[in-house]
Image: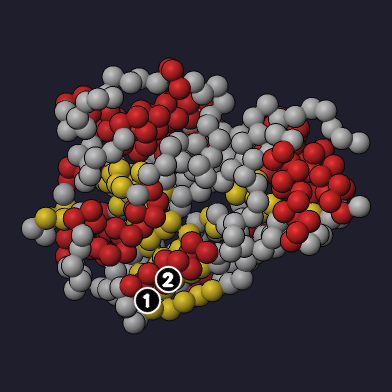
Amino acid sequence: MKPQLKPQNPNFSSGPCSKRPGYDLTRLNTSTLGRSHRSSLGKAVLAESIEKTKAILGIPEDYRVGIVPASDTGAMEMVMWSMLGARPIDVFHWESFGSGWLADITKQLKLEQVNSYLSDYGSLPDLTQANPQHDTIFTWNGTTSGVKVPNGDWISDDREGVTICDATSAVFAMPMPWEKLDVVTFSWQKVLGGEGAHGVIVLSPKAVERLESYTPPWPLPKIFRMTKGGKLIEGIFKGATINTPSMLCVVDYVDALDWVADIGGVGAAIDKSESNLAVLTNFVESRDWIHFLAKEPTQRSNTSVCLTLDASEQQVKAMIKLLDDEGVAFDIGAYRDAPAGLRIWAGATVESSDLEALLPWLDWAYAEVTQ
């Protein structure tokens, strides 16, 4: 029978993701609007967001955190164009975004000492093939595949190269072994449900050393430059952004950071996301027509949960449309490059009660399109 109870919040998009519970746009501090981001007020709010990011995530004191343009993509491009070419590169990829970084490295930067370690959607490549003498690039959580790296044990503590991690749908939802990671990029429009267009870059002292000791052979656009005269532009990591940020987006981010602190910190946010995954796991394991795309349970994402169905691609599309038309689940179709299926966001801004209310609708919609 058609369910009656609907999720109070049907926003299960994998980016931009659902706003936090209790979010109220009118409660944001809008004193920065109409003010220069270079004003003392603007710089203070930008610095506040950086300081709170470091504190809540437990980022080491000697790491730098900066706000950069163009979301996680912009942050990754800045890093690749500024740092790569000094050493051979190992690229581990198992979904579209990781493969996109490989394409940029080989087709745009045209670097030749590149090792590609590829796995199909649903599994990880052999991460132990990482060479400590090489630079390493990987995504922590494959947003389009629902496959995550379970830990950082495979990264050498004695590495000579730098590790560059695209962690956009992992930070604030999965533990980050900062001592293993030299560059981490993310965007606050993922796990924190922030607004788009801005990225965050985290640099270890080792990454700073690379930036200050290596000059790439290609020209760098202004928007990518993190050094001047061979020295790191420290202002970027104190609130002096490279280009003009949206101060409304910044205060929205501060609001999300304060919410994480209020619920108990990053550990509580991780627990909330893992509890959401448990709700979906119980559902999948009790039905024979729906499956995790991720083959290994330890590699299943607890944010971008990707599911395949015993149904044709046309039936899957019809099911997604039914759920959208009923107003119970928006934007849950698999990414365009991924196998046909569902992708349900389970990050901390999603309530377990909404996922529980959604599940009977999945049963109903599947029956409607396959009977």
> In the image, which disc is placed on residue 34?
none
> In the image, which disc is placed on residue 106?
1
What residue is drawn where x is 30% and y is 52%?
203
Residue 266 drawn above or below residue 28 = below
Q: Residue 58's x, y, as percent?
A: 40, 39
What residue is drawn where x is 48% and y is 64%?
98
Tag 1 secondary structure:
helix
* Closer to the camera in the image, 86 or 355: 355
Quadrant of the rendered image containing residue 282 = top right
Label 1 Cα neighbours within 10 Å, binned few <14 / some 14-19 / many ≥20: few
Q: Residue 179's x, y, as percent?
A: 38, 53
Are discs 2 and 1 less than 8 Å apart at CB?
yes
Residue 49 seen: no
Residue 255 drawn above or below residue 102 = above
* Closer to the camera in the image, 218 or 178: 218
Residue 344 seen: yes
Relative placement, left or right, of 34 versus 176 is left
The amino acid beneath tag 1 is: Thr
Quadrant of the rendered image containing residue 325 = top right
Question: In 3D space, how far apart are the residues under numbered discs 2 and 1 (Cα atoms)?
Answer: 6 Å
The amino acid beneath tag 2 is: Leu
Relative placement, left or right, of 316 versus 229 is right
What residue is drawn where x is 48% and y is 61%?
97
Q: Identify residue for label 2.
A: 102
Work out which residue is located at the far top of the displayed protein and give it: 27
Q: Residue 254's x, y, as percent?
A: 38, 29
